[in-house]
Image (cartoon, rainbow, N blue to C red):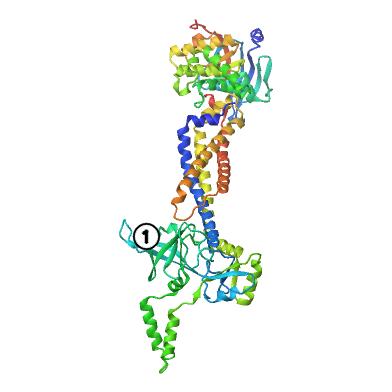
Amino acid sequence: MAELMTERAQGIRIEGLRKRYGRGDTAVDALRGVDMAVAPGEVVGLVGPSGSGKSTLLKCLGAVIEPSGGRMTLGDTSIYDEGWRIPDLRALRRDKIGFVFQAPYLIPFLDVTDNVALLPMLAGRPNGESRERARELLAALDVAHRARAMPSQLSGGEQQRVAIARALVNRPPVILADEPTAPLDSERALAVIRILNRMARQYQTAVIVVTHDEKIIPTFERIYHIRDGRTHEEAGEGRGLE
Amino acid sequence: MISLAGRDILHGWGKFVFTGIGLGLLIGVTLSMAGIYRGMVDDAEVLLDNSGADLWAVQKDTLGPYAEPSNLADDLYRSLQTLPGVARAANVTYLTMQVSPLTDDPATGDPNARARRAMVVGVVPGGFGEPGQPESLVAGRHLTRGHYEAVADISTGFRLGEQLRIRRHAYRVVGLTRRAVSSGGDPMVFIPLKDAQEAQFLKDNDAIVAQRRRSAANPAFNRPGQPQVLDAVLAAQTQSNSVNAILVRLTPHAYPDQVAADIRRWKHLSVYTRAEMNEILQAKLIATSARQIFMFLVILSVVSAAIVAFIIYTLTLGKIREIAVLKLIGTRNRTIAGMILQQAIGLGVIGFIVGKTVATLWAPVFPKYVLLLPGDAARGFLIVVIICVLASLVAIRAALRVDPAEAIGG
């Protein structure tokens, strides 16, 4: 296990992560020492029943809530070690973490290109360069022909591909995907996972997919099961991605 | 960086424009209220300008002739003309009454349908330059004859050559003027002084007959063997020798305060300079109305602020999920606050443009003069922007309290 972690140290590594809500008698331990490691270019599944701590883990990984203990390392940078090591969590989320949600949550008043280009613009990159980078990603995800469309004019699958493009546009070392295939049928769900795998390899991004979706669980080569705030790893089937 | 606020406004332009129009109508009413106040002040200025006087001599210890009744003997002006510094002194009377044309209204056939409430001003005939005469005419000529001529303000609707009835007599309109109004906004009708004195103090026939009967029954007036006493008393009772004020024009280089002091000292009259009369009109006559209008302005401003706050707050609540996503992907708080602020100001700008336009369009329809000053519009715009900024604070506070974790399920 230690060897595996060292091997994947350049992706994201979590050791003994804990999260406690509340204090005293009413305290609830949502995470009780989570260990995970995801290498660059790898897509892993994070599965577990409702209330198992999936969303809490995702929020901790996304620097949205503060863990109660443990360590998180992104690449070779320690971001949490019994306390945040990065002063600007907003910039961390913007530059180092990509998010894909259950619903695409595209900004309804921006067209497809600007929805994707918004992140590099927020990071201070010039508008032209940001849009160029967005167009490249849209082309890679086969939605370049909808670049000028508004989100409401896209199909569910197209919207999710645009959301993936938005998550990738700042070339983050890790992408957190929260039930990204939930609203899609089997064919489209598999297509999204294929895209995530292709993009992960292409951009050497570590991808963690939180899911309940039985259709896509067999596609992962590694799966983390979470139950009662603890994870255990097992090998997946890794099929259906050809 | 793209303008998030601009894109949102363009995306939902219909909602913004219609909301802006609603707000604009409210702003239009606010600007009109300010215009009504400015119109009242301007009416007072115009009233003083039109009188052509440097000093107003009125009954002692009164604020006449515009703010209080004032009666003076109509031969007093002669003694004022002899004072050093006085170029011209002329009697004047003011009487607000209903004036109707003798011609039937073409629509109703009723002459009273075109009757107007007007301030009838009795002036000494003589043409341009006489104190009390209108400063300029837009048609016809000034009063030159001693009787039965009139010059009317064009807003009365009376036409050149038309005959008017004032009390018992008919007057032909020989001239039309513009912006000749009382401090209350009633248009003026100028007639010769003698006619105005008669109109002001003339009783109706029944009252005259009754008074003659009473005088004849009084043994002090109707003495046996002295019938001329009763005739003299009756003549005195039916004639008027009073005017409301004497308008005094000064010679060049004369000091108004010095001449006014001389008149007060030697003639025992109250005298007001232009500045003092202006103060009487603004501080005493229109002060209550001004306070009333100010209260309306405050209420309308509060209502506008509440509407902008409600609209911006509602629009922000409708974007909570997008705001959560924006915060999660690393958007700064100031970018989100800026978006809401720009939308509020955008709404205010749309509202102001609509408000200024409608206020300009409907100002001439108001029965009283509405004066829309560019300075008031600029101040109004500034106040609208300040109100929008303040109103957006509630929505900004709500947006900044959105937890980025809301974008993640669970």
**In this view of the protein, can residue B380 be seen by the observer?**
yes
Q: Secondary structure at mark 1?
A: helix
**Residue at image point 54% right, 10% down:** A197
Residue B258 shown left or right of residue B226 in the figure: right
The amino acid beneath tag 1 is Arg
**Residue at image point 53% right, 44% down:** B305
In the picture shown, does residue B87 fall above or below A90? below
Q: Which residue is mark 1?
A: B114
* Horizontal and vertical percent position of residue A235: 55, 7
* Horizontal and vertical percent position of residue B355: 49, 44
* Horizontal and vertical percent position of residue B405: 56, 26
Residue ranking furthest to the bottom: B225
Give the image quarter of residue A165. Answer: top right
Residue ranking furthest to the top: A242
**In this view of the protein, can residue A42 be seen by the observer?**
no
* Horizontal and vertical percent position of residue A148: 49, 20
Nearer to the camera, B234 or A43? B234
